[in-house]
Amino acid sequence: MQIKPILTAMRHHKAGTILIAFQIALTLAIVCNALFIIQQRVTRVMRPSGVEEANLFAIDNQWADSASVQNVGAQIRADLTALRQLGSVQDAYATNSFPLRGWGWDNYVRLRPDQVHRTSDSAIFFTDDHTLATLGVKLIEGRNFTSSEAHDVSIKTLAAWPEIIISKDLAKKTFPDGHAVGKPLYVNSDASPSVVVGVTDTLQSHMTDSDITPFAYDAVLVPGYLLQGMTRYVIRARPGQLQAAMRDAKRALVTQSRMRIIDPKDGVRTFAQVRAKAYERDYGMAMLMGIVSVVLLAITAAGIVGLTSFWVGQRRKQIGIRRALGATRADILSYFLTENAMIGGCGVIVGILLALGINLWMVMRFEMAHLSGLYVLIAAAILLLLGQGAVLAPALRASRVSPVEATRPA
């Protein structure tokens, strides 16, 4: 197949050629960045929380008489005793927040009281000696809290905690030598340090926004029951009894005290629901980018089909002449496939440059990661294959043009 006749035909159809090439370039630029965004969002959604989520659920409990905060500590202990005695419940604890909660309490972590710049930001989880067993989190160094270390804590009288347990990711940041147990950390505005008594395996914080990704696995567990208007119970059901445990737990809490409010819609949630809520924006963005990519690819394919069909209609006499001079159906098919490949190739080259430019702008504007070359190659391959697939039908129609077309008047 000679390239010169194709270039001559393309010069005669400059507007259509440029339009299709630009459409391919724009689609490539958007699709490869969309694929990259989808990959990032899916990676965020799939990252582990560090807890055994299968049989876990949470109850958001608001105290109706929150002004009587002095009685909350005793009520929390009574609630936990009732929950742990349920046949469908394996374990439970009370907290202010938990992994993937979406919001909660976080504090700067410092190595020295006079340290100006923070070492890290970290989630603060109120816990007791049942927390690790409830969450299914392993202790990889040190010890667990004892039951006597969980005291009632008021925001007004809050001071530093004598003992804390930290996640292994936070331990690596604060103590790179690998020895965190027994070391002091400052995790509150109080000047007194807290001593690390244990280090957990992977444990995600409550924070899920993309701008806190560097701190996503920095967590500090502090012993105590926070005396405030809202208490959250995290409960592990026995295997296969999740629904029964959710029903029994809510009933047990109401039996203990009716002076509480549990939202009938979102007050009791499985951890699967917690995860879905935490990453709903990521799910939405991935779906949106997927829809945009599919629509753009469909529009581009339709444009290629329409324009090529138009060109075939205009060139029927020329195709007939070529057939009369001995060109085979395969020659005609190859001609249109090669022509489309050349237009697509030009569009892909421009599209790659445009894709890199868009990604560079997003890196500077939104602090996104740099686009991987793999996504550029994948998107380029998709566009080239799509173009060849789209042009195949009109090219086959062109190859079936009879030589008799050469004798018909224009």
Image (cartoon, rainbow, N blue to C red):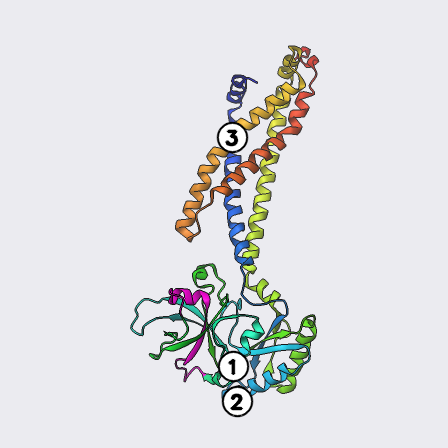
Question: Could you tell me which quadrant the N terminus lies in?
Answer: top right
On the picture, is 351 further left or further right than 242? Answer: left
Residue 2 visible: yes
| Residue type for callout 2 | Asn
Q: Is the Cβ of the residue at disc 3 closer than 8 Å to that at disc 1? A: no
- Residue 116, compared with residue 372, is above or below; it is below
Identify the residue at horizontal 53%, vertical 37% (top origin). 380
In the rendered structure, find residue 210 and report the number of the disc placed on it.
none
On the picture, is 403 further left or further right than 137? Answer: right
| Residue type for callout 3 | Gly
Return the residue nearer the eye: 56 or 185. Answer: 185
Foreground: disc 3 or disc 1: 3
Identify the residue at horizontal 39%, vertical 77% (top origin). 194
Per the rendered image, the range of residues in magenta is 154-179
| Residue type for callout 1 | Gly
Q: Is the Cβ of the residue at disc 2 closer than 8 Å to that at disc 1? A: no
| Residue beneath disc 3 | 345
Q: Residues within 10 Å of mark 2 (few under 14, many from 20)?
A: few
Q: Does dot 3 land on a helix, a strand or a loop?
A: helix
- Residue 105 painted magenta: no
Image location (x, y in percent) of residue 219: 46, 69
Marks 2 and 1, how far apart at CA: 11 Å
Marks 3 and 2, how far apart at CA: 73 Å
Q: Earlier in the sequence, mark 3 or mark 1?
A: 1
Q: Earlier in the sequence, mark 2 or mark 1?
A: 2
Q: Does dot 2 land on a helix, a strand or a loop?
A: helix
Foreground: disc 2 or disc 1: 2
| Residue beneath disc 1 | 229
In the rendered structure, find residue 71 and report the number of the disc placed on it.
2
Q: Earlier in the sequence, mark 3 or mark 2?
A: 2
